[in-house]
Image (cartoon, helix red, strand yellow):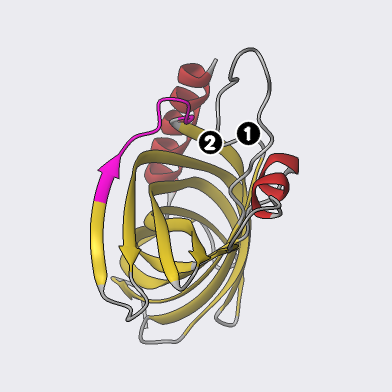
Amino acid sequence: MKSAFLSFLFIVTFYEFACAQRVALGFRIGAAYNMYRGSDWIAFRDFEGEGVTSTKIGPAAGIFVNSMLSEFFWIKTDFMYINRGFIHTVDHIRLQQNEHYIDAYPLSPTFHFRGFQFFAGPSISAFFFNSYQKYDSDAEKVKTDRRRDPHRRLLEFGLMTGIEYETDFGLNFGLRYVHPFTSMYNRINDISIHWYNQSLILSAGFSIGRDK
């Protein structure tokens, strides 16, 4: 089912490139604020033990294609690296877990008017690996580790929606919200895990090839 869905998105994306009157390529960098949701995340965060657990802000960067089908209607295609994760602090020792993802927003219908772009479309988040960083009370890094949790789901599907403003010379600023429909985790011992990646992404970028 997933392979059929991905094949459909690829075919439709290729078709809209072919139909576009103009195509602009670009890149963007920014920051992602991770907002986990779900009962299992809440249970983990509020576990009655020592320490405090909170989500974190991580770097984000990527490339995009704007296919301009008409003056007011575009299709956006985005690929972004996003560093998600959380921070756990206990007795002045800080453990930071980084979750390394590549997000694809392959087909986002976009209404364009006077530089403003309003868009929404499917999101696909591909998980690659976790990395862990441990800091002592003096904020000195004392340990770094990298691994992949065998229970993690490799592809998470959801919805992305956002707004962007682009100047006449191609500089753009945007805000995106990613709402997942699938959990980060596969079933464990036949038990569903309700832990979802939810993100706000603030970015700045530049379009190459856009008409002035």
Quickly name the residue at label 2: 156
- Image check: 142 left or right of 192? left
Question: Residue 202 appears at what percent x and percent y?
Answer: 51, 74
Q: What segment carries the magenta color?
A: 145-153
Magenta stretch prevailing secondary structure: loop
Mark drawn on residue 107: none
- State the residue in front, 86 or 109: 86
Q: Determine which quarter of the picture holds residue 162.
A: bottom right
Question: Residue 105 appears at what percent x and percent y?
Answer: 49, 48
Residue 111, compared with residue 48, is above or below; it is below
- Image check: 126 left or right of 51? left
2 or 1: tag closer to the N-terminus: 2
SS at mark 2 in the image: strand
Identify the residue at image location x=58%, y=63%: 51
Separation of residues labelled 2 and 1 (CA atoms): 5 Å
Residue 196, compared with residue 10, is above or below; it is below
Q: Amino acid at mark 2?
A: Glu
Question: Residue 140 appears at what percent x and percent y?
Answer: 26, 75
Quickly name the residue at label 1: 182
Q: Determine which quarter of the picture holds residue 16.
A: top left
Q: Mark 2 and 1 residues: CB-CB less than 8 Å, in contact?
A: yes
